[in-house]
Image: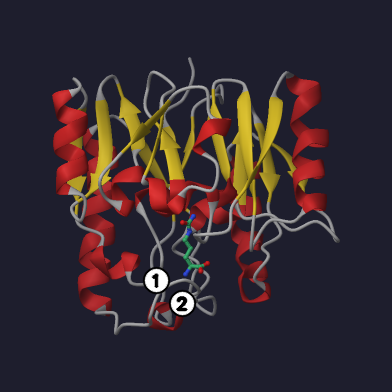
Amino acid sequence: MPTKKALIRRPGPRLAEGLVTHIEREPVDAELALEQWEAYGEALRAHGWETVEVDPADDCPDAVFVEDTVVMYKNVALIARSGAESRRDEVAGVEEAVAHLGCSVNWIWEPGTLDGGDVLKIGDTIYVGRGGRTNAAGVQQVRAAFEPLGARVVAVPVSKVLHLKSAVTALPDGTVIGHIPKVDRPSLFPSFLAVPEESGAHVVLLGGAKLLIAASAPKSAELLADLGHDPVVVDISEFEKLEGCVTCLSVRLRDLYA
Ligand SMILES: NC(=O)NCCC[C@H](N)C(=O)O
């Protein structure tokens, strides 16, 4: 049976020192962040996902954004090499976790850089954002890792936001959603729907019509509900202050046989 597991990683004591690139730094309430992270995990579990906690990496402020450390395709876990040097020590615990879950493990190597937030999978099409964190060698290495397994890798420029998935994600029917001012080239996607808020572009597919979406995107949630989707709202304000979004707090593992 295909699994429904999701990797998550508890926020560490240095969370407030996390990187900010495209937004102004704001103070982070660590206690509230922990409550929001617990509620996020609960929302996954309530929709049938077994959460697997990766060992904390307390020296790494951004470790909670576990999505950036690994890209899954079929049973292969491609361990990322962040474009931000301060994030490179995050991968050790993730490598261990995916190996324990039975994944085949592969790596992005120097000179390649890649953050998992730059990778959007829609079926067997893998869009890779070439931006501040992912370089051309990183894109090539994703091609080399996954095209032999049946994927088609499409490179997409990203200049206005941190990661490709800060600009766009996809609905269960494959429609790509994005907030136009933050998307470099909407025309690269075969089916594109504009949403009214930046954070409304971020959804995690929970199964069926259920979409996890941030509380900061009420108009987008309303638009998606009106189109027959079923938004599940979580407040992640403390992570948004660090340029995080709903996608970056987990990695779903759907194609493992355990
Ligand atoms: N995939 C994501 O959206 N990750 C968010 C990472 C935020 C973190 N403060 C960073 O700049 O790396």
Q: Left or right: 85 with respect to 235? A: right
Which residue is painted at 70% across and 31% down in the image? 153
Residue 202 visible? The answer is no
Cβ–Cβ below 8 Å for labels 2 and 1?
yes
> Front-most of 84 and 22?
22
* Rendered view: 82 above or below 15: above
Q: Amino acid at mark 1?
A: Leu
Q: Which mark is residue 18?
A: 2
Residue 82 point in image, percent of width and height? 67, 62
* Rendered view: 145 above or below 139: above
Residue 19 point in image, percent of width and height? 50, 76
**Counting other residues with Cα less than 10 Å from the Cα at mark 1, is it few (<14), some (14-19), or many (20 or more)?**
many
Q: Secondary structure at mark 1?
A: loop
Residue 222 visible? The answer is yes
Q: Quadrant of the C terminus?
A: top right
> Front-most of 63 and 187?
187
Ligand 1 is within 8 Å of the C-beta of the residue at disc 1: yes
Ligand 1 is within 8 Å of the C-beta of the residue at disc 2: yes
Q: Secondary structure at mark 2?
A: loop
